[in-house]
Image: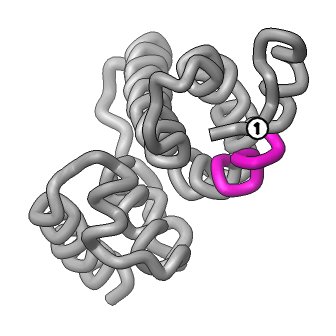
């Protein structure tokens, strides 16, 4: 936990927490939602949960922030999909085929579910073990393995 007296300097405690977790959280958010929305997602998540972090109600702040970012990314993705469907319906009643987006690895990874992208990011980009990834995302190691297997299958098909 922080060595900052939150009663006398709450702004300093928030700033110290942000500086401690900012880089990792923004990188993780970038893997989930892309670089354009990464900083916004990371800062929104941080300010949503900073009270819990300062009060000491959280034993593992990094894991807590990663889980909150993953949940927010799910919510953002669902929102965008709904908006896309509404816009598509408003423009035309015809079925519009999506363009071929399997042109490189980034596009293939972007088509993974948020949970799969989170696991792929932590295991392959952050070089974390499956059990460490499970602890961070607060899921079982079996779920981590399942997401990895499904992501590999998807990526293999997408990149053939």
Quarter of the image for residue 131 reads: bottom left
Q: Residue at x 51, y 50 (%)?
A: 32
Q: Residue at x 80, y 23 (%)?
A: 5
24 is within the stretch colored magenta: yes
149 is within the stretch colored magenta: no
Q: Quadrant of the C terminus?
A: bottom left
Residue 52 lies left or right of residue 136; in this view the side is right
Instruction: State the predominant SS element of the stretch in magenta.
Output: helix
Residue 153 lies left or right of residue 113; in this view the side is left
Q: Position of residue 93 (x, y in %)?
A: 33, 19
Against 34, residue 160 (above or below) is below
Q: Residues within 10 Å of mark 1 (few under 14, many from 20)?
A: few
Against 116, residue 9 (above or below) is above
Q: Position of residue 133 (x, y in %)?
A: 35, 64
Q: Which residues are magenta?
A: 18-25
Q: Quadrant of the N terminus?
A: top right
Q: Residue at x 55, y 70 (%)?
A: 106
Q: Which residue is mark 1?
A: 3
Q: Position of residue 22 (x, y in %)?
A: 75, 46
Q: Residue at x 67, y 56 (%)?
A: 24
State the residue in front, 26 or 18: 18
Residue 22 lies left or right of residue 116; in this view the side is right
Residue 142 visible to the viewer: yes
Against 24, residue 153 (above or below) is below
State the residue in front, 1 or 58: 1
Q: Describe the element under mark 1 as helix, strand or loop.
A: loop
Against 87, residue 156 (above or below) is below
Residue 108 visible to the viewer: no
């Amino acid at each position: 936990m922080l060595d900052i007296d939150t009663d006398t300097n709450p702004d300093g405690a928030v700033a110290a927490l942000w500086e401690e977790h900012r880089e990792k959280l923004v990188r993780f958010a970038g893997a989930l939602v892309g670089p354009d929305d990464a900083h916004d997602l990371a800062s929104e998540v941080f300010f949503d949960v900073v009270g819990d972090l300062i009060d000491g109600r959280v034993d593992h702040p990094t894991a807590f922030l990663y889980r909150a970012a993953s949940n927010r990314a799910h919510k953002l993705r669902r929102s965008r999909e709904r908006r896309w469907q509404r816009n598509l319906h408003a423009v035309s009643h015809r079925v519009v085929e999506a363009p071929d987006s399997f042109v490189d690895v980034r596009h293939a990874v972007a088509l993974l579910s948020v949970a799969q992208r989170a696991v792929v990011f932590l295991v392959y980009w952050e070089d974390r073990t499956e059990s460490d990834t499970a602890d961070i995302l607060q899921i079982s190691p079996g779920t981590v393995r399942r997401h990895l297997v499904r992501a590999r299958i998807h990526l293999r098909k997408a990149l053939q």
